[in-house]
Image: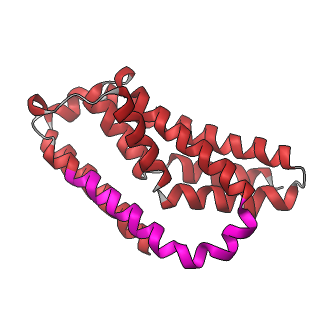
Amino acid sequence: MNLVAFLSYVIALAFTPGPNNLMALEESKRLGFKRSIPFMEGLLAGFLILAISTLVFTDRLMTYIPSIEPYMKTIGSLYILYLIWGLFSMSDKSENKEQSNQQLFISGLILNLSNVKVMLYFLTGYIAFILPAYENIWIALLLGLFLCFAGTCSNLLWASFGSLFKNFFTRYEHVATFIMAIMLFYSVIEIWS
């Protein structure tokens, strides 16, 4: 396996803006880093589920991806549009109802499991890099877990930005919300391009 190409792929996909990273930033900005951890745990659970299921079902997934892709794109797009609506509906922080850790976890899990970028991240990682180089399932799984680790590090980094720049985001709340919504909407456009 070309390690430089693999690491470039992982860094480019894991650390660029996408629904997971943008919502990790938003939740951390809204709740603070520590309080947003259940959301990021949900993202991690989604990473683990997708890493293992993609590895196990890679052959079948390659057969069925063309037929299920439009449905997954639709589900992912609708969920991201729902998140955009949520950004604008929670602009008055004083009226926000407190979410439980379980609700935050489930929100992160659903976001990750409906995120086409993450699905393709694992599928391409396995098909283009890992499986052609390693026949041993345990090595492939270990490298799949590395993909999870990179995604989680990225989510934590973006959440740190949300927490560190909370005062800035609060001061320019409407502008920050608008920019966040535009970036999420761009994610929807990218899903369909």
- Residue 78: x and y, percent? 32, 63
70 to the left or right of 184: right
Image coords of residue 14 (percent x, y) = 55, 48
Would residue 87 be counted in the magenta stretch?
Answer: no
User: Which residue is most to the right?
Assistant: 135
Q: Please report the bounds of the magenta region as a residue range.
A: 57-85
Residue 86 can be seen in this image: yes
User: Residue 105 lies in what quarter of the image?
Assistant: top left
Q: Residue visible at 33% across and 57% down?
A: 80
Q: Residue at x 60, y 46 (%)?
A: 49
Image spot of residue 22 (x, y percent): 37, 45
Quarter the C terminus occupies: bottom left
How many numbered marks appear?
A: 0
Q: Position of residue 92 (x, y in %)?
A: 9, 36
The dominant secondary structure in magenta is helix
Q: Is residue 99 above or below residue 123?
A: above
Is 111 in front, or is 129? 111
